Amino acid sequence: MRILKEFKIPNIKFPKLKMESITEIDEQTIKEHSEKKRHIKYETKNFKTVKEIFEFATTQYKDEIFMLEKFDHKEPFTEIKYSKYREDVIALGTGLNKILNLKDKRVIIIGENTYHWYISYMAMLCGTGIAVPVDKELPPNEIENVIKRSKASAIIYSQKKKEVIKKIKENLPEVEYFIGMYDDEPIQDREVGLNYIIEQGKRIVNSGDDSYMKIEIDPEEFKVLIFTSGTTSKAKGVMICNRNLAQNVNVIGAYVYLDEHDRLFSVLPLHHTYESSIGFLLPMSVGASIAVCEGLKYIVPNLKETKPTAILAVPLLIENLYKKINENIKKSKKDKVVKSMIYLTNALKGVNIDIKRKVFKEILENLGGNLRIVVSAAAPIDMKVGKWLQDIGISFLQGYGLTETAPISALTPEYDPRVGSAGKAVTCAEIKIDNPNENGEGEILIKSETLMLGYYEDEEATKEVIEEIDGQRWFHAGDIGYLDEDGYLYITGRSKNVIVTQNGKNIYPEEIELLLGDVQEIKECMVYGKEEEKSKELTISVKVIPDYEKIEQIHGKGLSEEEIRKIIWNEIKKVNKKLTSYKAIKNLEIKKDEFEKTTTMKIKRFAELQKDKK
């Protein structure tokens, strides 16, 4: 079984709070904040290709910082300017084309988030070939399978993947080059260093060769191949073109304002479209900087050192930060003070006086001090978490989309976020509900300029999810939801996860899992319909990983497995009282090992259920 250990949330710690209660609010402070108006122009852009974005950003913002990365944990973050990034991308693209003859060929990119990943991806999109970003956490046999399926001519890999590549190299005679990031070695057999290609490319460019930047990019041309995580079935290859990616950048500006003064914190893997599009191409298009997190165990010190203004994250990470901060507030005996401050500042905000960031400055300092936007996507999140972030002065936004929509389809506007909603359709998309029930719920259909070209070498699978209606391509997202009267989308479940009872009732596991998320004794859980022998009826069941540390704190040490089971079952019975009878959990399984997950920390339901069948 594959466990993505890198994305196991660490024990995050924050310093004790010293917050004092506010007995009076200075009149001058109220006057200053009530008069401050943030004049923002929300607007769409009109980039047709990623190369246009690159050309614009690296010339317009050449003296600004493009990214910050720690190449040595003991050293400060290294700052890299847009001018340096431009030079390296053009040099690498030129070298890949002229020296390795990789023009129009497929190239795997595998490794952790690092400067050479950003260079490699951009070099491919601006004029080399087809980029194939691969999940670095895949086991060797799956990496080998993706390389063969994609018909890759070269592999760009990080030093941490060197041993894995070495193991499978002999099984890949069709691969022409194995290119090591941060490696200076010249071409030897099929091995070559990325630094060597960059340096040779610079020599070619400096000799007067500008052929790379003269390459014209067709917005509709297949340029990126991404294999889905396969949470419910075998991974499919998603074919993406420049138009798909450029439209992600174009439409965000209508809902969220970013400029060259912003800094995004990169914590999610770049092979995922969520991070590579919204966390990379979007900030680049406005001249913002990107701070690369060293790893989840360094998230708090990295936030404090780089002081980002925005972060893209998955619910598990956001919820963990929420829990740890609130545990710290209680330990500091400041929970009553914070609660009264939230009540007071919400009342003031209701009359257009927003002093939240001043009042909650000490809490915000734990997250770097400048964080103003948190975007959650990839899975449902408890509404109280988003509401709390809003309460302390951070805009909590939710995005919705899939790899097949490259990925953004809907987003909550920062000027009207509506916690609990996945947002409104972005300006290049339209969302509708297929065959809605009496509550307006049905499968989500998406028509968008970001919609993939199709599944790689799988026309049948493409036809299964893309339906032509009145000459328009509509994508069957597989998610269940409804639209409110203002066009805001609410996700209530996933059709592939839906539990259908014998009397035709539909039960969405995510709805029950959100309620179980409030149980302190439960670390993680997965609700599913358990097939009973000699019966067609499904029993609503839950697999639970107990939070042993929390159980010990609340119930004491030395508890037997049966006692722990009883504690959790009693909590489940309390949750059942909040559910209609047919949704009530009837069976509990205490899980001894970790859930198998995707890189965005979603449980692979299909894989977990397959284990039971075996």
Image (tube, helix red, strand yellow):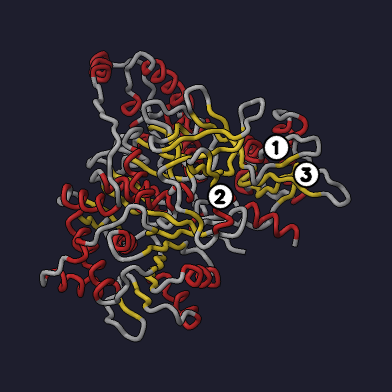
In the rendered structure, the answer to whether residue 602 lies left or right of residue 263 reads right
Q: In x, y percent, where is residue 599?
A: 50, 55
Q: From the image, tell me which residue sits under label 2.
A: 602
SS of the residue at dot 3?
A: strand
Q: Which residue is drawn at 19% across and 61% down?
A: 214
Q: Report the disc number at residue 587.
A: 3
Q: Which of marks 3 and 1 is nearer the N terminus?
A: 1
Q: Quadrant of the C terminus?
A: bottom right
Q: Residues within 10 Å of mark 1 (few under 14, many from 20)?
A: many
Residue 488: x and y in percent read 48, 28
Compare residues 383 and 559 and report the one nearer the observer.
383
Whether residue 165 sits left or right of residue 189 in the image: it is: right
Disc marking residue 507? 1
Q: Residue at x 33, y 33 (%)?
A: 254
C-alpha gap between disc 3 and disc 1: 15 Å
Q: In this view, does 12 lie to the left or right of 31?
A: right
Q: Position of residue 264 (x, y in %)?
A: 32, 45
* Helix, strand or loop for disc 2: loop
Label 1 or label 2, whichever lies nearer to me, is 1
| Residue 363 - label | none
